[in-house]
Image: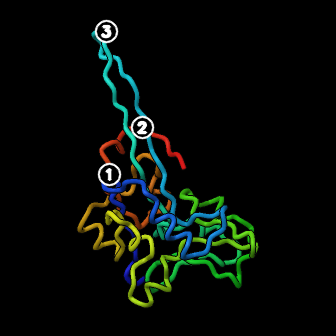
């Protein structure tokens, strides 16, 4: 495997503007049923008894931008019956070979991040390919370039982990042990509390 690419998401900086989501949708000409990058709101908490007759609160809300995490152990690849879902050797990007995809949907059912999505026009699966066409021209993925606050970075995952951390799980995301995502998240102050994601 060459330099495994990954994403860094600074949840503490993300304002929830959805510029990354819209740029990705426009660039990939996605229909209304597909979003390769999704910005979700995570919120929770409430009033907590103090034990002295009063209450305090632990309310929180934050946004999180997530796409395919081009996992080290992609369950979508493992469960694809035709080998259409594969991991590229040169950069670890998980991609779809449309010549082999039969549209069975096993990859979508398997992925805990909801990355593979049905292209109704072709009857085949589709997903984030890390903007491979832009990478080939030396340009960043469109979501990275579109973020006005610089909350998304990309690059070799080991470099991102060395610079930022190894955290890949916050509220709103599944257990990283399932697929070992190539993702680093800078946690928002509320992300260590119980929350529930909302589209």
Comparing labels 2 and 3, the label whose residue is closer to the camera: 3
Task: Choose top left, top right, bottom left or bottom right for residue 155.
Answer: bottom left
Sequence-wise, the earlier of marks 2 and 1 is 1
Whether residue 104 can be seen here: yes
Q: Position of residue 195 (x, y in %)?
A: 44, 39
Q: Position of residue 52 (x, y in %)?
A: 27, 10
Q: CA distance from mark 1 to mark 3?
A: 33 Å
Q: CA distance from mark 2 to mark 1?
A: 13 Å
Circle 2 residue:
194
Q: Position of residue 38 (x, y in %)?
A: 51, 59
Pointer 2 local density, CA inside 10 Å: few below 14, some 14–19, many at least 20: some
Is the image coloured rainbow, by chain, by secondary structure, or in one colour? rainbow
Name the secondary structure under disc 2: loop
**Residue at 69%, 67% in the rendered image:** 118
Q: CA distance from mark 2 to mark 3?
A: 24 Å
**Residue at 54%, 50% in the rendered image:** 199
Circle 3 residue:
53
- The foreground one among 80 and 57 is 57
- Residue, far top: 53
- The foreground one among 49 and 181 is 49
């Amino acid at each position: 495997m060459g330099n495994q690419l990954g994403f860094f998401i600074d949840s503490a900086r993300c304002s929830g503007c959805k510029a990354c989501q819209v740029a990705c949708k426009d660039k990939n000409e996605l229909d209304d049923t597909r979003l390769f990058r999704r910005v979700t709101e995570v919120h929770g908490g409430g009033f907590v008894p103090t034990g002295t007759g009063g209450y305090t609160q632990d309310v929180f809300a934050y946004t999180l931008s997530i796409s395919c995490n081009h996992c080290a152990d992609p369950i979508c690849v493992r469960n694809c019956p035709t080998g259409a879902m594969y991991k590229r050797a040169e950069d670890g990007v998980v991609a779809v070979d449309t010549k082999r995809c039969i549209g069975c949907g096993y990859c979508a059912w398997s992925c805990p991040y909801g990355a593979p999505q049905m292209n109704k026009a072709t009857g085949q699966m589709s997903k984030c390919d890390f903007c491979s066409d832009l990478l080939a021209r030396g340009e960043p993925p469109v979501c990275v370039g579109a973020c006005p606050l610089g909350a998304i970075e990309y690059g070799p995952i080991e470099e991102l982990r060395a610079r930022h951390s190894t955290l890949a799980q916050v509220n709103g995301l599944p257990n990283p042990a399932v697929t070992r995502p190539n993702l680093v998240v800078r946690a928002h102050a509320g992300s260590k509390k119980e929350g529930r994601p909302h589209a």
